[in-house]
Amino acid sequence: MKTLAKTLFLALPLTLAPLAQAQQRTFTVNPAASQIDFSLGGNAHSVHGIFHVQSGSVEFNPTAKTISGSVLVEAASGDSGEKSRDKKMDSTVLETDKFAEISFAPKSYTGSLSDTGDSTIQVSGVFTLHGTAHDITVPMQIHMEGGNVTAKGQFTVPYVKWGLKDPSIFILKVAKEVGIDLTLVGKVS
C-alpha cells in the first residue's frame, strides 16, 4: 500500500504538468488592427492622434495568474494630422532618432480572465518611454471570443514629470500629461 501511495505521489506532478501547460496561452497582437490613440489638451486647442503598434506577444496563464511578454510601438509613428507638429514631437519631445521604440512589458495582473466574453483586469508592468522604464498599472477590458481577442485600456502618461521636453511655446501652452487610449486586437493560442 505504501508503494502505491508513493507511486501516486511521485506521478501526481507529471499528471498535473500537462494541465498547467494547457492553461498557458499566448496573445499575439495584430499590428494592422491595433492602435494607440493619444490626446493632449492645450489652452488654444486639443491635439488628438495615433501611434501604430509595431508588434506584441503576451503570454498568460489564467489559472496561475501569470503574465509576461511585450507590446512595442514605433515612436516615430505618431500622427496628429499636422506634419510640422509631428516633426517637432519626433525630434524634440520623443527624440525618436535616439529612442526608436516605446514598449510595455506586463509583469502581473489582478482580476479574472474569462475564456469567452468580457473580463476586466488590472495589468501592472513596465512602460518604457524615452529610454526610461516606469512602473504603471493599466485597467484593461478584455473580450475573448473563440480565438479572437480585443484588449482595451486607458491611462495617462505624465511625460514632463518623466523627463521629456514640454512642447509649449510662448502663449500656446499644452498639458503636461498625455491621455492614452489603447486598443490591441489579435489571436490567442
Image (tube, rainbow, N blue to C red):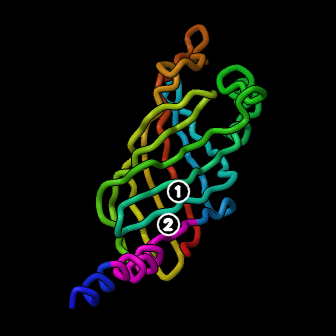
- In this view, the residue farthest toward the top is 170
Q: Nearer the viewer, residue 183 or 39?
A: 183
User: Few, some or many C-alpha atoms within 10 Å of disc 2 (few <14, some 14-19, many ≥20)?
Assistant: many
Q: Which residue type carries mark 2?
A: Thr
- Where does the magenta region start and end? 10-27
Question: Tag 2, which secondary structure?
Answer: strand
Q: Which residue is mark 1?
A: 183
Question: Tag 1, which secondary structure?
Answer: strand
Please check the rendered image and state whether residue 17 is part of the magenta-colored stretch, yes or no: yes
* Chain-order first, disc 2 or disc 1: 2
Please check the rendered image and state whether residue 139 is part of the magenta-colored stretch, yes or no: no
Determine which of the numbered discs, if any, sits on residue 150 in the image.
2
| Quadrant hosting residue 9 | bottom left
Identified at 67% across, 55% down, the residue is 55
Q: Which residue type carries mark 1?
A: Thr
Q: Nearer the viewer, residue 149 or 181?
A: 149
Q: Quadrant of the image for the N terminus?
A: bottom left
User: Few, some or many C-alpha atoms within 10 Å of disc 1 (few <14, some 14-19, many ≥20)?
Assistant: some
